[in-house]
Image (cartoon, grey):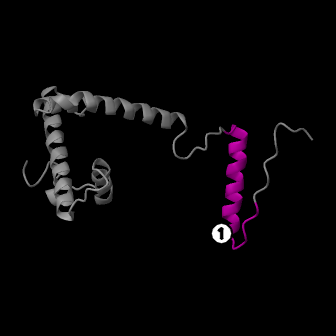
């Protein structure tokens, strides 16, 4: 691969989070094994180069199939073409696990949901309360304390 890649950034611009990579490296080794900083940096560079290699070959597979988006099957074919066929089963299993976890996260409502659904009326009431708090802050007033939500199961 050339020093400049397809999107116009130099190799030096592409890297992986050092802390995350260091953690992965340490988790893969026995606790009594230490890794020199230079060796960690070299491993990170190898990972970046491997990702570049797989991405480039995946792109070529995608182009041969006249597709515009690299799909998981393109990555698997790239692994085979580059001689990493023995890893395909493990990579595919990791991909399937990722899909399951992603689906479970989306069913939970994502990062903004607390798992409880609001009715439209409750959402409008909460929105009005937040608007009132924001107006009070903008007008230099204090924030009105949040009113306790009436328990819908208890009738007055």
Q: Closest to the observer: 17 or 113?
A: 17
> Badge 1 local density, few (<14 within 10 Å), some, or many (20+)?
few
Give left or right: position of 87 versus 104. Answer: left
Q: Residue furthest bottom?
A: 140
Magenta residue span: 118-145
- Residue 70 against residue 5 in the figure, above or below: above
Give left or right: position of 131 versus 100. Answer: right
Residue 4 percent across, percent down from the top left? 11, 54
Image quadrant assignment for residue 11: bottom left
Residue 13 percent across, percent down from the top left? 20, 59
Q: Closest to the observer: 62 or 96?
A: 96
Q: Residue at x 16, y 51 (%)?
A: 46
Report if residue 100 lies within the magenta region: no
Magenta span: predominant SS is helix
Q: Is residue 10 visible?
A: no
Q: Residue at x 13, y 50 (%)?
A: 5
Report if residue 128 lies within the magenta region: yes
Q: Residue at x 13, y 34 (%)?
A: 60
- Residue 12 against residue 111 in the figure, above or below: below
Image quadrant assignment for residue 118: top right
Q: Residue at x 27, y 50 (%)?
A: 29
Q: Is residue 109 visible?
A: yes
Q: Closest to the observer: 72 or 128?
A: 72
Residue 26 percent across, percent down from the top left? 30, 54
Mark 1 = which residue?
Answer: 138
- Image quadrant in which the C terminus is located: top right
Image quadrant assignment for residue 10: bottom left
Q: Residue furthest left?
A: 2
Residue 51 percent across, percent down from the top left? 19, 45
Q: Residue furthest front?
A: 32
């Amino acid at each position: 691969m050339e020093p400049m890649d397809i999107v116009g950034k130099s190799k030096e611009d592409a890297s992986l989070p050092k802390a995350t990579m260091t953690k992965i490296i340490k988790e893969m080794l026995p606790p009594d094994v230490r890794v020199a900083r230079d060796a960690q940096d070299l491993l990170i560079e190898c990972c970046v180069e491997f990702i570049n290699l797989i991405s480039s070959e995946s792109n070529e597979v995608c182009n041969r199939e006249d597709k515009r988006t690299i799909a998981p099957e393109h990555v698997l074919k790239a692994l085979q073409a580059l001689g990493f066929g023995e890893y395909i089963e493990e990579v595919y299993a990791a991909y399937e696990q990722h899909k399951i976890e992603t689906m479970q996260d989306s069913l939970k409502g994502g990062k903004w949901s607390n798992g409880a659904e609001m009715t439209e009326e409750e959402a409008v009431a909460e929105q009005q309360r937040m608007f009132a708090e924001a107006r009070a802050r903008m007008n230099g007033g204090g924030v009105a304390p949040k009113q306790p939500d009436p328990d819908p199961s208890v009738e007055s």
